[in-house]
Amino acid sequence: MTTPIVALQQPKDISLGEIEEELSKIWLSQNGGKAAPIATRAATFSMVIYEPEEFQQLLGGLGFYEGPIDGIHGPQTRDGIRNAQKTYQLPITGRVDPETLAKLRAEFAKQPEDRQQVTNINVRGFSLADAIAAQNPCRIVTLCPNIGEEDTGVTAQVSAYCPIQKQNTSNLVCSEYVTLRGTKSAMERVGETVTSLMIPDLPKFVWWKATPNTDQELFRSLCETSNCIII
């Protein structure tokens, strides 16, 4: 059963240098004397989620998928995979195996530069697995590398959400969400910023939803600064 949540701060576009300041403002605004429940930041753990969802972006860029970039392997995604596999004469499984992913990458790279675009709505960073959300994370930092776009740096959004616990409605224990978007190269350039966003005195987890690459500086840096890597 999904735990209901209340938005303490809707997603807000900010610059990288404003992240900590904007998050601090959320908690400064939560003081006594209000009719609404008082909200506090959870003191549990922080997590960085590397969420490329490259296969959905490739399917969208090649015209096989019109749904959102969300990492969900639903019916629309599986249909897109099967259509691509049929078109490229691959075994039709509805799953992204290494052969299918390699073919999608190759076909996307063949397209003229002006057609290497992904116009699907991007909703990464706006949802979280119930199993993680239920643990009241202190801070979730989601990295969303994009393909098919010009490298113009990294953009940031911050938000805060609070699960409503039936046994305690007088106080809300809330989680901070930071979403960073940009090309893969741009993400590599802000690795130091990413690691600095992990709360120093709390356990640090990394969920790397891509093939691990020890030559990738961002991956190495997160491995060195986290307590646990989830592959």
Image (tube, rainbow, N blue to C red):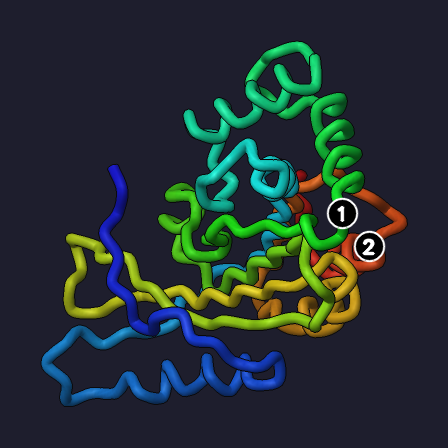
Please name the residue shown 57% across and 24% down the image. Answer: 81
Where is residue 207? Give x, y as percent.
Answer: 62, 47
Q: Quadrant of residue 62?
A: top right
Please name the residue shown 22% across and 57% down the image. Answer: 164
Where is residue 195? Give x, y as percent.
Answer: 69, 67
Which label sits in the foreground, 1 or 2? 1
Please name the residue shown 22% across and 69% down the image. Answer: 171
Q: CA distance from mark 1 to mark 2?
A: 33 Å
**Which quarter of the rendering shows the N terminus?**
top left
Where is residue 122? Give x, y as percent.
Answer: 49, 53
Q: Is residue 58 above or below residue 117?
A: above
> Which residue lies under the disc numbered 2?
220
> Which residue lies under the disc numbered 1?
112
If you read the primary sequence from the N terminus, does the residue marked by circle 1 or circle 2 appear first? 1
**226 relative position to 64: left or right:** right
Q: Amino acid at mark 1?
A: Pro
